[in-house]
Image (spheres, helix red, strand yellow):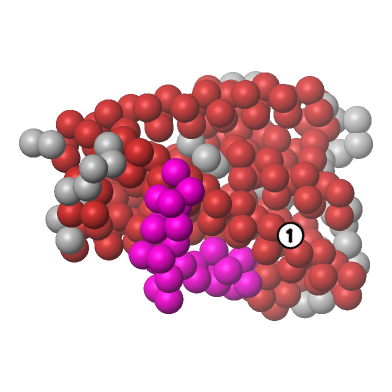
Amino acid sequence: MLALLRSEKLKMRHSFGGLLPLSAAMLQIFISLMLSRGTDFFTINAWNWWYTMILPGMLAVLCYLNMQKEKKQHYANMLLTSIAPDYCWMSKIFYCAVKLLCANLIFFIGVFAGGLLFGDSVSPAAGLMAAILLSVCYLWSIPLYLMLSARFGMFAAVFVCMGLTVGSLILLGATKLWWLCPASIPFRLMCPVLGIMPNGLLVEPGSRYMNPAVIFPGILLSLLWFAAFTFMTARWFRRAGTK
C-alpha cells in the first residue's frame, strides 16, 4: 500500500491537484483576513467558512482531478497491473485522505498564526482538535466523490457535494437528527469543539450544542459511513473496470 501511495503522489506531482489543499487553505485564510478586516472575528469566520464550504468543495475537486488523470489513460495504471483493482482504488482513497489531513493542518497553522496577530477567539487546542475531527468526519466523502468523478465527471461530484452540504447545513446541522446524514456530522461536532454554530453564530453558554457527548458517536458514525462507501465503491470499480 505504501508503494501505491507513493505512486499516487508521483502522479499528482507538479499538478494543480497536488497543490490544491495548500491553495484552498491559504485562499480561505486570505479571504477571512480581508472580510474580517483584522478583527477578532477572523478565526470564527475562517473556521466556519472552511468546514461548511471550502473544505467539502476542495475534496470534490481533488477527487475529480485525481480520477481525471486515470481516465485520460483509460485506467491502464489501475487495471493492467498485477495489483488487484480494489487495492488501486483504496490507494486513491488513502492518498486523498492524506491530502485532507494536510489541508486541515495547514489551515489550522494559518489560522493560529492569524489569531496571534488579530486576536484568537478559538483556542489552539480547539483548533487542532477541529482539524483532526474534520479530517476524520469528511473521510466518507472521498470514495463517494471518486466514484462520481469516475462515472459522471466533475459536475456530478461538485453538484452532489453542494447538495449534501447545503441540505445538511439547512435541514439537519443544528437539529437532533444530525446523525442521519454523514454531511451534517462535521457541522454538529464543531459546535462543542469550536463553539461555533453552522450558521456562523457563537454557541451560547449553557446551550445543549456545547455538550461534547456527541463527539464520540460522530466519529464512530463517520468511520462507519467511510467503511461502507469504501467497500461499495471498491466493488463497483472492480466490476466496472473488468467489463
In this rendered view, identify the residue nearer to me: 172 or 121.
Answer: 121
Residue type at tag 1: Phe
Judge whether residue 51 can be spotted in this image: yes
Q: Position of residue 149 (x, y in %)?
A: 29, 50
- Majority SS type along the magenta span: helix
Assess disc 1: are there few (<14), some (14-19) or many (≥20) residues with their C-alpha within 10 Å of its C-alpha: many
Q: Is residue 6 left or right of residue 206?
A: left
Q: Which residue is mark 1?
A: 108
Residue name at image x 24 percent, y 54 percent: 77
Judge whether residue 160 can be spotted in this image: no
**Quadrant of the frame with the N terminus:** top left
Q: Which residues are magenta?
A: 1-28
**Quadrant of the frame with the C terminus:** top left
Q: Is residue 207 left or right of residue 104?
A: right
Q: Is residue 60 left or right of residue 36?
A: left
Find numbered disc 1 in the image and state the secondary structure of the residue it sits on: helix
Residue name at image x 78 percent, y 31 percent: 209
In this rendered view, identify the residue nearer to me: 89 or 123.
Answer: 89
Q: Is residue 225 left or right of residue 188?
A: left
Q: Position of residue 211 (x, y in %)?
A: 82, 27
